[in-house]
Amino acid sequence: MGMYQYRAILKKGFSQDIGSFESFGIQAVLEASNTVVETVFDVSTDGTFVQRIVDLSNQLELDPIHLPDVVEDALCEQ
């Protein structure tokens, strides 16, 4: 296991246009102290898609500095 653990986060919101919605983001947490070091909010409303990014980031032991780029690339390929 790497120094960082990635996890999906859920945010509930409301929009005048669509009403209530759920949006998933990703957090990178420093394992030793459980400190959040990077967060990307509102990645997608598709929790399965976000979980795939989380799983791959954990598997590859991604450095959190690369998380925004990984999310952007995954969204472009979706």
Image (cartoon, helix red, strand yellow):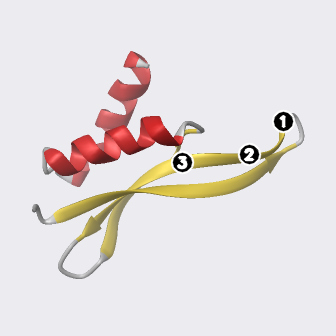
Percent coordinates x, y for residue 52 in the rendering: 35, 39
Instruction: Report the residue at 29% width, 67% height from top.
Output: 29
Q: Earlier in the sequence, mark 3 or mark 1?
A: 1
- Give SS at disc 3: strand
Q: Is residue 42 visible?
A: yes
On the picture, is 29 further left or further right than 50?
Answer: left
Residue 19, position in %: x, y?
A: 86, 43
Q: Residue at x 37, y 36 (%)?
A: 71
Left or right of 56? Residue 7 is right
Identify residue type, mark 3. Answer: Phe
Q: Residue at x 20, y 63 (%)?
A: 4
Say which amino acid is labelled 2. Phe
In the rendered view, tell whether residue 73 sits above or below residue 34: above
Quadrant of image for the C terminus: top left
Is label 3 in contact with label 2 (beta carbons under 8 Å)? Answer: no
Question: Mark 3 = which residue?
Answer: 24
Most extreme residue toward the front is 48
Residue beneath disc 2: 21
- The residue tagged 1 is 18
Query: Are discs 3 and 1 less than 8 Å apart at CB?
Result: no
Q: Is residue 73 left or right of residue 2?
A: right
State the image coordinates of residue 67 (x, y, percent, origin top left).
30, 44
Q: Secondary structure at mark 1?
A: loop
Question: Disc 2 on helix, strand or loop?
Answer: strand
Q: Quadrant of the N terminus?
A: bottom left
